[in-house]
Image: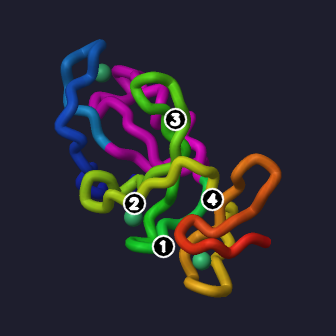
C-alpha cells in the first residue's frame, strides 16, 4: 500500500473525533476520516461535488456550490486561496474576445466579463 501524508483539513470527524483528511478517489477528491477503515465517515457535500470546468486563474476545478440561502453559484475549489466565482454556470469555453469564461444565462451563452454573446 502506498503511503502518502494525507492532507489535513483542520476539521474533526463528527463520529470519532479523528482528523479529517483529503483523499483522492475515482470521482475526484473528497474529505474523509483519517481513522479509515475503522471509521467510514465521509463528508457528504465533498463527495457529491459537481465539477463544472477548470478555473481560468489557478487551474483548479470550478465546482457548483450552494450559498447559505440555497442559491447555487460556481466557485473555485482552491478557495480561499483563489476567490474566483460566478453566479452563472460556466460552459468551459472561453470568450473569443477577452478569453474569460463563457457562461449560460437561461438559454443565452454569453461572456462572464464582456458583452460578447454566442
Ligand atoms: Zn471518524
Ligand atoms: Zn481558482
Ligand atoms: Zn468576453
Residue 12 to residue 8: above or below: above
Q: Which residues, given as a range, are shown in magenta?
A: 22-51
Element carrying mark 4: strand
Return the residue found at the far front: 115
Q: Which residue is mark 4?
A: 90
Residue at position x 51%, y 56% in the image = 62
Q: Which mark is residue 84?
A: 2
Image location of residue 107, percent across then percent down: 82, 51
- Which coloring applies here? rainbow
Query: How far separated are the C-alphas under marks 2 and 1?
Result: 8 Å
- Marks 4 and 3: CB-CB under 8 Å? no
Label 4 or label 2, whichever comes before in sequence order = 2
Question: Quick one: label 4, few (<14), some, or many (20+) residues within 10 Å?
Answer: many
Image point 44% across, 41% down: which residue? 30
- Residue of label 3: 47
Of marks 4 and 3, which one's residue comes earlier in the chain?
3
Amino acid at each position: 500500500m502506498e503511503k502518502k501524508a494525507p492532507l489535513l483539513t483542520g476539521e474533526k470527524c463528527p463520529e470519532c473525533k479523528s482528523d479529517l483528511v483529503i483523499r483522492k478517489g475515482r470521482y475526484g477528491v473528497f474529505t474523509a476520516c483519517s481513522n479509515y477503515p475503522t471509521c467510514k465517515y465521509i463528508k457528504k457535500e465533498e463527495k457529491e461535488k459537481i465539477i463544472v470546468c477548470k478555473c481560468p486563474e489557478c487551474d483548479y476545478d470550478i465546482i457548483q456550490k450552494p450559498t447559505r440561502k440555497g442559491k447555487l453559484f460556481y466557485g473555485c475549489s482552491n478557495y480561499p486561496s483563489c476567490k474566483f466565482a460566478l453566479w452563472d454556470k460556466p460552459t468551459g469555453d472561453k470568450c473569443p474576445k477577452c478569453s474569460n469564461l463563457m457562461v449560460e444565462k437561461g438559454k443565452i451563452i454569453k461572456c462572464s466579463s464582456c458583452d460578447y454573446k454566442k
